Image: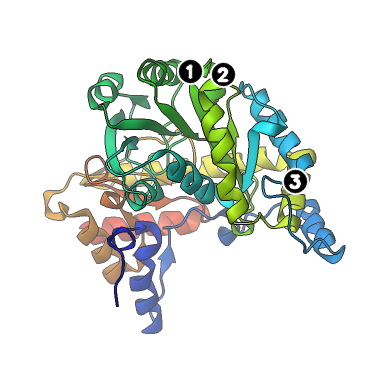
Amino acid sequence: MKVSRKVMGVEYAIRDIVAEARRLEAAGRRVTYLNIGDPPWYGFQAPRGVLEELSRSALAGHAHYAPSEGLAELRAEIAKKEAAKGLDCGAEDVLVTNGVSEALDMVIASIVEDGDEVLLPGPYYPPYASYIRLHGGVPVEFATDAESSEPDIADIRSKVTGRTVAICVINPNNPSGTVYGKKALSEIVDIAAERGLYVICDEIYDEIVFDGGFDGIGSVARDAAVIVLNGFSKVHLMSGLRAGYMAFSRTPALDAIREHLPKLARVRIATCLPVQHAALASLRMPNGYIADFVSGLRKRRDAVVRGLDSVPGLSCPVPRGAFYAFPRIEDERFADDRKFVMGLLESRGVLTVHGSGFGSRYGSGHFRVVFLAPVETLEGAVEAIRSYMA
């Protein structure tokens, strides 16, 4: 029976590789999973008050459909958060989704047609390229310096063509942990405004920054067509509850997409109402736990980077945000990063993700390590990598 070429082209390296780990476990092997950025899976839990609100909402009978655009009170609180980062928006400019992935799918579906090009930061989170291809578009990678966290503005300019419709920014970046500053964001916005392009900025890790502060793209958006994607999976430790959103900058440039994109929200009906009540609670309650979370991550980051950088044949830039290390494989014996990752899994039982899964141009020759596990687990994994390479 027929299967569309579109769906055959969909890849998600982070989860696709799990099948091999499951095969080893079925054979009685122990596997250390360092592949998925899922804080609750590693023991980080949302505050009790958030989970109690989820339960209270469900037990109170809130099992009915929510408004397609999202709970009004939640949209208002989200608008306050994004406005505090500089985005000119109100509750009417926010649309609640089932995680950032659904928000991304809706935006790409609304702006991409066959042959249209979308610029992605190299390396990039895999669903960006998958959704672009699924909707008939072409992903085009631009360069970022992992050491300085600076995007190559000249490279971005050179890759804008008559078919380009948008520039995507993932800030802080998954998988590299780079964090763009205000100057870089402003230059990207300038290019988009000059060429009539959307800017889609994913800020899901906005409060997980280790060195220096964080600048939201809203602070430099001006009249450009800026759409911010964000959610509750990472900072708010609610990954499995699937709550995200998009926020539109209040500019006439977005009038058309504001009118038509909500139709997709109505077609998919709504986001789970008890989950929205939990998300609302997470925005309203004291958030001191976030600082504790980030402090714990900083210790893990430092241990992983120090360890990986000491392994002969590897070099590991220091990630400034998120919870991923993205070391480069410099030993020519391991030139194929996917074979490197599969060999590491097979021989040492450590599951990471091959860098080429995050883009062939700037991801190849790397692998990604999630540093959410306890420090002793991470140090053990580093020693397994050292042993494997030796």
Say which residue appears at 36% left-offset and 72% top-offset. Answer: 19
The answer to whether residue 331 of the structure is visible from this angle is: yes
Q: Position of residue 58 (x, y in %)?
A: 80, 63
Say which residue label 2 marks: 219
Percent x, y of residue 210: 52, 32
* Amino acid type indicated by mark 3: Leu
Marks 1/2 in contact by CB < 8 Å: the verdict is yes
Q: Amino acid at mark 2?
A: Ser
Q: Looking at the rendering, in which quadrant would you find the C terminus?
A: bottom left
Residue 70 vs residue 122: left or right? right
- Up the image or down, 24 lies above or below 241; here it is below
Q: In this rendered view, identify the residue nearer to me: 319 or 151.
A: 151
Q: Quadrant of residue 324?
A: top left
Pointer 1 local density, CA inside 10 Å: few below 14, some 14–19, many at least 20: some
Instruction: Looking at the picture, tell me which residue is in the foreground, 233 or 221.
Output: 221
At x 81%, y 58%, the residue is 52
- Alpha carbons under labels 1 and 2: distance apart: 8 Å
Residue drawn at x 35%, y 51% is 130
For mark 3, does the 10 Å Cα neighbourhood hold few (<14), some (14 to 19), or many (20 or more) residues?
many
Q: Is residue 254 left or right of residue 55?
A: left
Label 2, residues with CA under 10 Å away: few <14, some 14-19, many ≥20? some
Point out the tag, 2 or 3, that comes first from the N-terminus: 3
Q: Quadrant of the N terminus?
A: bottom left
Dot 1 corresponds to which residue?
A: 182
Q: CA distance from mark 2 to mark 3?
A: 26 Å
Which three-letter amino acid code belongs to the residue tagged 1?
Lys
